[in-house]
Image: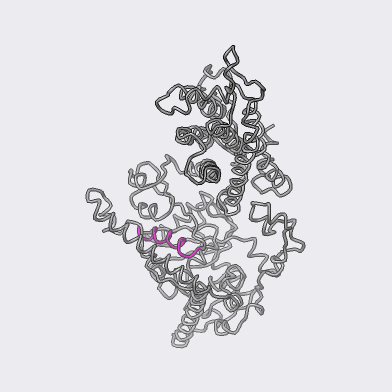
Amino acid sequence: SLCSKKETAIEIGYSTKVLHPDMRLIKVSNRSNLKLRTLVAMEFMRLVKSGKLQDYQKKNLETSKQDPWYGRCWDSIMHNLEFAGTCISRFVTYFMSPFSKKREEIRDGTEEVTEQHLKPSMDPILRKKKVREAAVKIIREYNAKSDRSSRSGDGSTKDAGTNNFELNPVELICANNSEEIELSHEIMETPHVFDRAASARKSIMKNMKAKERSNSITSIDNFSMIDEERLSMSTIDVEKTENTKATIFEKLFSVDRDVRHGNLSKHNTESLGPTSFHEEQSSSQKNAMVIEGSALYSFLGDPVMEEMLFSVASQCSSVIACRVSPKQKAELVGLVHDYVSPTPVTLSIGDGANDVGMIQRAQIGVGISGLEGQQAVNASDFSIAQFRFLETLLLVHGRWNFMRMSKVVLYSFYKNAVLVFIMAIYQEKCFYSGAPVFNQYFIANFNILLAWPIMLTGIFDRDMSKEYVYNNPQVYSSGRDNEYLSVRMKLRWVLITICHFIIVYFLSMSMLGLQGGMTEYPGGFSKSDSGTSPGDSEGGGIVSFGSTMYYTLMFALNYKLMFETGAFIHGKFPWFKCRGKESWPSRFPWTGFGLIVMSFLFFLFFVYIYEHWYDLDPDYFHATPNYLEYRTMTWMTILIVPITAALADFIPKFFSHQFFPSQTQIHQEIDALQGR
């Protein structure tokens, strides 16, 4: 039955530690439409009055300003584009894939739900006002109905408080003719773990009697006349939290958002504790919700009720949905996309065909391969064998991969931008004729030579050890806060790109131009014994100048990559001597192989082979020994210019890390000290 399914879900929640004894359990069971909506509305208003949902308070709704007209136009355009993309995707999926199971999934309603995209865009302030007004209206309607039913009843004597809603900071119990609405907040005793669901009703009745003796009841008739400032549940003093300041250097140099906004404990000069006893209780006590699929029909499909339900669920530490259809699962994921701003990255995990819609609705889908078949695995982005592997997938590999891919993306744009800027600024010297400063084959092999180091960094790089990440899961917030791809981080890469191409070009020009291109010996340095062929070490031509600058550019870019790499894979020597289950890839020095062998040595091998191919480039025939073997200025340039570029990157980075570190950098230092 439905009741047994709900109790089973609660038992599983306690046994898996999703639910805890100190949680206030909110149970949304199969009741009438009005009762379900009324109780969710009461919980919604309780959270608003207690300061948990400050966006819905009257003060914020009245003082908030609407977005300008161009902002609303942009939101409308983006909404229409999203709707058009959804329609095109459904059209292509339905008509262009006749041999797949996708058409049946769309027809049966198990495909991802796109009705959420069809909702008209509305100003957030107006939408929140409508939700609050709807909550008050629903409560009044039910209160009026309860009064009418009590007056027209069988004449039995009842307490006036039982016909009205309780507005109590600890629990909300609604009763009509001795029938309770089973969406209640339970502070249950601690029976055996599998007896919690069976003793839930007794605990509720016990709490009701205790609260009736100790607390007064506030009728909904006077609800609209009560203001936030007059309630016993006073809100948190927001002005105290806004009275925090960060220094100008923290705002300029820190990447961490909490440091820049002054949200750390060192910025708080006053206590930010709760301002009332009720708030102290609610701040330390967590909520949990158990909702049935039959109850969801009262909320899903109505944007106002959806937002109200989601607002209540968002204040719960755990939400369990039982007896939910595949379409409802996808719609629950869609609530997160629609009513959280900015739109978060959602993850859905399932093991059966009924989870396909939910997996496809989320940005990240994880399928569990098991007895339920392979439908969930085929529709997912990642596949795992057991549910317990999800912790490692998210906290360890997910965090590492986001950090690695961020570095790969930023570095790839950076190195190509430096190359293009140098070629563009050189056009001033060649009268904008389009002549490249570098050899055409050097340009063609640029990404090949520099691909190995960044590719190995994207595979093996890690900023913290696996054990430390397990013991400190709060480090996962760096990826959730988009610390690695934030606007501030992108601006840093843009600035260092401009700085590096200026240093590489102009410093190389000053060292190799003018007298820098002449030989160091008065009579020339010639390989012939007669000395009649001076000029073998002359470097004033475009071949010597461009090739030398290309070398300096490669060294500067690899130095930059070494600064960004958090883990150098040195391996163990001898590399091919394996012991036990250890294989040679785990002993191989991948970092040195990528930087030295596949970048520098491979380029030397290329230029010495390339200089003998006269048919490919007659101007470069036997040019490598001229500028690489006989000229000391070449090696001085290769030594000085990349080090100068590295110092331009190292000094600001050291200053920022030393005096204004992010929380991730502090964790890296702690991990390094513990690993010694």
- In the picture, which quadrant includes the N terminus? bottom left
Residue 325 drawn at (x, y percent): 35, 59
Residue that sits furthest to the top in the current view: 529
Residue at 51% in and 77% down: 129
Question: Taking 464 as reference, is 211 above or below it?
Answer: below
Residue 441 drawn at (x, y percent): 45, 32
Residue at 43% in and 71% down: 121
Residue 202 drawn at (x, y percent): 53, 64
Looking at this view, is 627 or 471 the one in front? 627
Residue 629 drawn at (x, y percent): 59, 21
Residue 522 in the magenta stretch? The answer is no
The quadrant in which residue 63 appears is bottom right
What is the number of callouts on the image?
0
Residue that sits furthest to the left in the current view: 98
Compared across the picture, whether 294 is left or right of 513 comes to: left
Q: Which residues are magenta?
A: 326-340
